[in-house]
Image (spheres, rainbow, N blue to C red):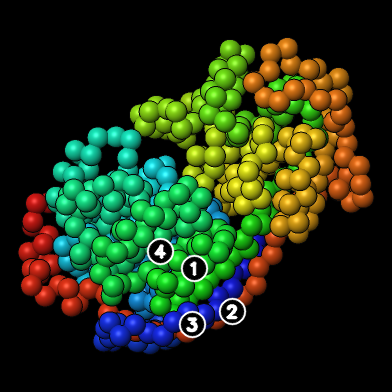
Amino acid sequence: MTSAFAQSNPVRPTSPHTRNRPTKGHARSERAETRRPSGFDRFDLDPRLARALAEAGYDEPRPIQVETIPACLDGRDVMGLAQTGTGKTAAFALPILQGLLEEPGDGPLVLVLAPTRELARQIENEIRTLARYTEIETVCVFGGVSAASQTKALRRRPEIVVGCPGRVLDLLQQRELDLSWVDTLVLDEADHMFDMGFFRDVRKILAALPKDRQNLLFSATMPKEVRSLADQILNDPHVVELAHTKPSERIDHFLYTVDEGRKRALLDHVLAQEDCRTAIVFTRTKHRAKRLAQQLEKQGRSAVALQGNMSQSQRDRAMEGFRAGRFEILVATDIAARGLDVAGIDYVVNYDVPNTPETYTHRIGRTGRSEATGRACTFVTGEDRAWLRDTERILGAPIPSETLPEGLPTAAAGLGGREPRTGGGRRSGGARGASSRDGSRGGASGGAASTRNRSRRGGRRSGRGSASGRASAGR
Ligand code: AMP
């Protein structure tokens, strides 16, 4: 497991609007110093959160949690560079919940923006798990479904709103969502948010938020657009970086060089491996995902597609079925590549290579989650050479190559892909061919953080009713 490093990274001076958080941060660190830190005890969290953590089986904080939680608790802005599967949701959810327990108020006080509905739902579920012994409410809003139940839920003034930018903006413009009390903003998967063209919506949402707030920004990569947004919104952030763009050490990843016409047979070979009980197969297009899932079903496999042409309820059914083990194979487009957390996926198969090296890391990160190990294989055609070169350069190591199985037939019916080409076989060239399945391993380094006190909810609570008054309001 790689270790995290953190550094203080002054981006711009402390905002003149910053209020002082009187003693909370100091009291916390004094109390913590008198104890030997162990497990989650080191964060001195509310017993209701500690109970939920214990029940969820979270014994030891993950590196991103060790590095992020103290700074968040101190009210600092945080920039977390971490890929999914590292435990980053709890890294921001725990301090947020702690803050809401210490300083309650009518919501929404916390806004979490995520690029996809699946990720938003997953965040909502994680927050609900951790908040199960509190009265804190979380509502999730996203497009593709009727807004009626979401607006109804928002009228209960939940403390936390998790949502995708499009729907959040719609609800804001319809005055169904009041963001004027938000004092903590989380931007999750900011790079993906940019890739999906959400930045314009995000900027409009930012303009509707109070200026004086805590900002927590998470991104697996730091393209210049995300860097520029971070520079604009983060105030003296605490920066936590985990090995980004590098696959997890627990993932054994390798590639096959194969022509388009034999991909289908190669997939059968991979899915027939003894250690492949569950798999996500990624295709480039929605159409291919649909066709491939249908073909696998016809072969008697329990497969389901997850692609953007499906309705929200179809997508939910596919995800839930896969999560519950009713389907062994999920054939997905990149919509499923980020953030999704399904335990125990044995294989990720890149039937088609992803668009970017970053997406490669995200896709293969669907296996090897948490403490589990996983395997990821990529089908590379002659046309993917430039992609391979770029990806290996960014990963800093070649992706080990596997020899094609003997006698692989060319599929009679293709999947609408490019024309079959001749070729395949073991990739030539040095360490790559020889080091089959050695895997390339990412690294990371460590460091320390400084603290800054900052007020969160106290000022806003005045005139908004006490915690007890709030607890009885419409709950
Ligand atoms: P995330 O990166 O937030 O998607 O988290 C990946 C997975 O790790 C999720 O299933 C979490 O429930 C789980 N997780 C997060 N923190 C811990 C922890 N400290 N101990 C055990 N599991 C954790």
Amino acid under disc 2: Gly
Location of residue 401 in the rendering, given as x and y in whole percent from the top left corner: 82, 42
| CA separation in Å, label 2 and label 1 | 24 Å
Viewer-proximal residue among 5 and 387:
387
Which residue shows up at 47% across the image and 57% down it?
A: 190
Image: 208 above or below 406: below
| CA separation in Å, label 3 and label 4 | 20 Å
Q: Secondary structure at mark 1?
A: helix
Near mark 3 (Cα within 10 A), the count class, few <14, some 14-19 or many ≥20, is some
Dot 4 corresponds to which residue? 92
Q: Quadrant of residue 419?
A: top right
Q: Earlier in the sequence, mark 4 or mark 1?
A: 4
Image: 40 above or below 24: above
Q: Earlier in the sequence, mark 1 or mark 3?
A: 3
Amino acid under disc 1: Ser
Q: Earlier in the sequence, mark 4 or mark 2?
A: 4
Image: 15 above or below 357: below
Amino acid under disc 4: Phe
Q: Earlier in the sequence, mark 2 or mark 3?
A: 3
| CA separation in Å, label 2 and label 3 | 15 Å
Location of residue 430 in the rendering, given as x and y in whole percent from the top left corner: 92, 50
